[in-house]
Amino acid sequence: MTVIESPMAGKILEILVEAGQSVAEDDEVIILEAIKMENPVYAPENGVVKEVKVTIGQQVAEGEVLMVLE
């Protein structure tokens, strides 16, 4: 199991994958708005999305778990 954490504090703009979807290493999975810029968050490895722990518009802290892969 792998967790994807927020690289910085910000707001979730887009969630590009859903539970059950396969992802490849370096696929964009979430778009995070921070410092008035859109910052993509990438899958660290190949896997299947087990759980998305955030919603669009949610404020997140640096290091907060965004998604779980298996």
Image (tube, rainbow, N blue to C red):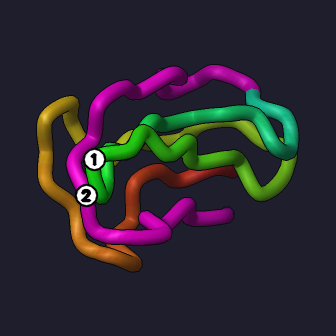
Which mark is drawn over residue 4? none
The first of marks 2 and 1 along the sequence is: 2
Which residue of the protein is positioned furthest toward the bottom in this rendering? 63
Which sits in the foreground, 38 or 59?
A: 38
Magenta range? 2-22
Q: Amino acid at mark 2?
A: Gly
Q: Measuring 29% from the left and 31% from the top, which residue is drawn there?
A: 13
* Residue 28: % across, % down: 65, 34
User: Helix, strand, or loop for circle 1?
Assistant: loop
Q: Characterize the local packing of mark 1: few (<14), some (14-19) or many (20 or more) Cα atoms within 10 angstroms.
A: few
Q: Measuring 64% from the left and 21% from the top, which residue is drawn there?
A: 21
Which mark is drawn over residue 36? 1
**Considering only vertical position in the picture, is 27 above or below 67?**
above
Q: Measuring 48% from the left and 37% from the top, which residue is drawn there?
A: 30
Q: Amino acid at mark 1?
A: Lys
Residue 1 occupies quadrant? bottom right
User: Helix, strand, or loop for circle 2?
Assistant: strand
